[in-house]
Image (spheres, grey):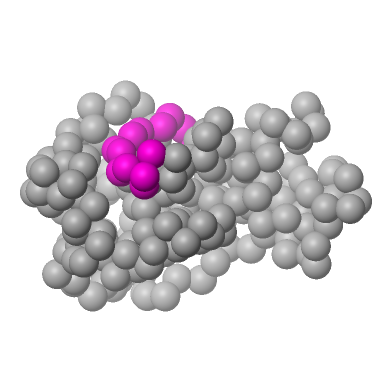
């Protein structure tokens, strides 16, 4: 196992946000952001650090790489790392694609890919909202690209803190939207579809375009 250890990057830390807790108002209220980033995400970071502390050789890998290799983890920590490490990775991904600066929506190659696979941006948004609203219980809604199918885009939802990184044939994520009630309940109560319809205003589409370009260039770590 020791041969796979690059310079240490763990124990993992709560990544700072590039914006303030109040900066995503009115889409996400300040109290939700404070709890979501400062408490919920922090708990996942603490949880995966605690689990991996008994197998420190794994702490040399990024959380994304650990999740890709979930099947190789020792039995006694695999499920905990799936849950806590998945929570850390999913939230880290989620914060990256949010911005307080309203963008004009997807453009260029990204818009072309969305139109090819969904017909239009408007249709894509409707399908994404529908998929997320119908998902039973907690989880995440993703837009992924399938490198093995000419980068075909697909909307999918996963339960709990499962990550697209764990799929048998990993298809990198372009966007991820948190379907857990802690992401929206203070403002939207039980109206998850309203949260999903509102969140487009804070998606950082230029960054999503960078992710698509990175995926097409074969980058594993986005
Ligand atoms: Fe969350």
Instruction: Determine the residue located farthest toward the right in the rendered image.
Output: 2
Q: Quadrant of residue 18?
A: bottom left
Query: Residue 101 location, x and y as percent?
Result: 23, 75
Q: Residue at x 42, y 57 (%)?
A: 216
Residue 148 versus residue 103: which sits nearer the camera? Answer: 148
Q: Magenta segment, which residues?
A: 149-161
Residue 80 versus residue 145: which sits nearer the camera? Answer: 145
127 lies left or right of 19: left
Q: Residue at x 68, y 46 (%)?
A: 66
76 lies left or right of 219: right
Query: Residue 17 location, x and y as percent?
Result: 45, 71
89 lies left or right of 3: left
Q: Residue at x 32, y 64 (%)?
A: 209
Looking at the rendered image, the quarter that the N terminus falls into is: top right
Instruction: Determine the residue located farthest toward the top in the rendered image.
Output: 136
Q: Is 154 inside the magenta-drawn segment?
A: yes
Q: Is 24 inside the magenta-drawn segment?
A: no
Residue 95 versus residue 65: which sits nearer the camera? Answer: 65
Residue 28 versus residue 99: which sits nearer the camera? Answer: 99
């Amino acid at each position: 196992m020791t041969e796979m250890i690059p310079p240490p990057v763990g124990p993992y830390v709560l990544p700072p946000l590039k914006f303030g807790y109040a900066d995503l108002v009115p889409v996400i209220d300040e109290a939700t952001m404070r709890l979501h980033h400062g408490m919920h995400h922090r708990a996942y970071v603490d949880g995966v650090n605690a689990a991996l502390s008994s197998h420190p050789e794994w702490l040399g890998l990024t959380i994304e790489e650990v999740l890709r290799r979930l099947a190789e983890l020792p039995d006694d920590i695999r499920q905990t790392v799936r849950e806590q490490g998945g929570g850390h990775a999913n939230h880290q991904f989620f914060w990256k694609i949010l911005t307080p600066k309203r963008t004009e929506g997807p453009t260029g190659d990204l818009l072309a890919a969305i139109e090819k696979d969904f017909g239009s941006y408007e249709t894509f948004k409707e399908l994404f909202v529908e998929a997320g609203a119908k998902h039973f219980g907690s989880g995440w809604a993703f837009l992924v690209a399938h490198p093995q199918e000419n980068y075909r885009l697909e909307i999918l939802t996963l339960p709990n803190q499962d990550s697209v990184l764990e799929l048998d044939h990993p298809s990198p994520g372009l966007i991820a939207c948190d379907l857990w009630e802690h992401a929206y309940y203070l403002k939207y109560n039980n109206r998850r579809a309203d949260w999903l319809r509102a969140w487009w205003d804070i998606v950082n589409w230029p960054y999503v375009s960078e992710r698509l370009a990175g995926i097409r260039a074969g980058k594993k770590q986005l």
